[in-house]
Amino acid sequence: VEEQFYVVWPLVIIGAVWVSRRSGWSARLTIGAVAAAAAVGSTIWAWWLATQQDVQLDRLYFGTDTRGVGCVAGCVLARGVRTGERHIGPIQTGLAGLGAAVLIGMLVLIDGSERWLYGLGFAVIASLAIVNAAAGQGPVGRVLGVRPLAGIGRVSYGVYLWHWPVIVVLDEEATGLSGPALGAVWVSATAALVAASWFVVERRAPLPVLRRPAIAAGYVLVAVAIGAAAIVVANVDQPSIDADEINAPPPIAGPSTTSTEPGRPATSNGLLPNAAERPATEPRAGSQTDAQPTSTIAPPSTRPVRLLVLGDSVAESLGAGPEIPVETNGVQVEVTNRSVVACPVLWQGKWAFDDGRSFEGPVECQGDDRFSDVVTDVDPDVILLMFGWPGTISGWQFDDGTVVAPCEPGFDEAFGDEYDALVGRLESTAQVVVATVAPPSEFGDQQQSDRPACINRELRERDFRIFEFGEWLCPGGDCTQAAPLRRDTIHFANAPAVLDAVWPVILSETMTAAGY
């Protein structure tokens, strides 16, 4: 939004000034009139877009054309009068108090997903009432003009620039902290970076004689902040993950009735038998066709077997995979993970969240020929399809406006048919293995927790080569032992110990299902 504004608004001002000079009008009046027209037009346009259910909220939020009120305020408030000379009366003070109450109420009561907020909601100029009252002599100006707040205001642009990268980098996973402790880290890191950028970049040392020492101190602060962040990330207290603990047989009361055999032995990973422990004639897990021995495919003699992983954020959370070919089942395997966050199986339509939000899947995951470029680029021998998110916290809105979720009529069959078409097309290039969906852990909504079972039932009824990923991760639907592996309810934690424990199982089970 900011960069769009920096490009567009200066051009508007130049044009307005040119018009004012040729017409003899006041430049401020001309700019103000253009800004007012833009504000009214953008407000009406935003309101209309917000009523269109096929328009995503991101479009409303990030579009320059849906903004404009602030430009009018800039023309109205900046009248050439010094702030200290403006007198703020009781009406302006009262409006500022009302504006503060509105902002606090919005902070408490809304979460950003309300569509009205992006239409007429943003036309509420509560914050402008506060700015107006603060820019003059009055109680609001005195309160907001105290030295600590004025100091923050002086470096507020730096705070704006630095706080978000700090929050992204120093998150709960990286620091092992949460709540007030994590907030303290964010504030401290942001403060250090803001102080450094203020002296080093903005060069606002209070006295010229202090300029060079201040710059030197700024460099030191930056180095300390970066070093501290690196230490925190490198020595993060990751979830306790012990290889022996992961490999120990889990205390499972009973196996799943869908595809596992009662009493089968615990294994090196403690969850599913790996390929070396399976009988050579074991049928493909999950297949509902007549049991047939799994064929043995001879690997290439001059190179490793190429495995291409395609899927959504669950597969993407596994990272790029082993950097070098790994020996699995006596075969060298080279892994390429081209999974995409929010990549859907159904592509004609869009995601429909249970909370009312919706958005379209990524462009690279749409169309009948999706993934064809990736397949051509990698030229895989085996393709693992791991769409681990469908139905967990969202359903699907078809092009006709119908919204359905797993376990509901109209979704499961459509999902299975689309998956069938995708597998059929990719099988002309490689052996395709389909991973079942693991149930989410610690989900309060039982309906959402049950959805993966409906998806898996549909997958198992198809003639797919199945990797029982869901049963491996959460045997019998119990995800207790999988908790250390996950950073949230469905995605893997991006920690070396996790990836070292997960990838060997995925490779072994995938290659076995593929016939290697």
Image: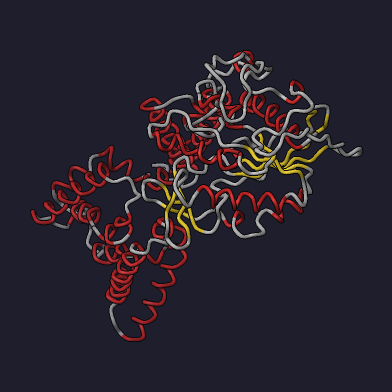
Counting from the top left corner in percent of width and height, residue 20 is at: 33, 81
Question: Which image quarter: residue 142?
Answer: top left
Compared with residue 193, is residue 415 higher up or lower down, i.e. above or below? below
Q: How is the image coloured?
A: secondary structure
Question: Which image quarter: residue 482?
Answer: top right
Counting from the top left corner in percent of width and height, residue 188 is at: 41, 31
Q: Left of 111 or right of it: where is 262?
A: right
Outermost residue on the front side: it is: 290
Outermost residue on the left side: it is: 90
Compared with residue 159, is residue 87 higher up or lower down, i.e. above or below? below
Judge by depth and name the residue closer to the eye, 104 or 293.
293
Q: Residue at x 75, y 42 (%)?
A: 382
Counting from the top left corner in percent of width and height, residue 33 is at: 28, 75
Judge by depth and name the residue closer to the eye, 321 or 107.
321
The reply to whether residue 191 is in sight is: yes
Question: Which image quarter: residue 401?
Answer: bottom left
Q: Left of 355 or right of it: where is 396?
A: right
Judge by depth and name the residue closer to the eye, 277 or 315.
277
Q: For the N terminus, which image quadrant?
A: bottom left
Count of labels in the image: 0
Compared with residue 363, is residue 490 higher up or lower down, i.e. above or below? above
Q: Left of 511 or right of it: where is 233?
A: left
Q: Left of 29 or right of it: where is 216?
A: right
Q: Residue at x 56, y 42 (%)?
A: 458
Compared with residue 174, is residue 288 higher up or lower down, i.e. above or below? below
Q: For the C terminus, which image quadrant?
A: top right
The reply to whether residue 196 is in sight is: no
Counting from the top left corner in percent of width and height, residue 295 is at: 81, 35
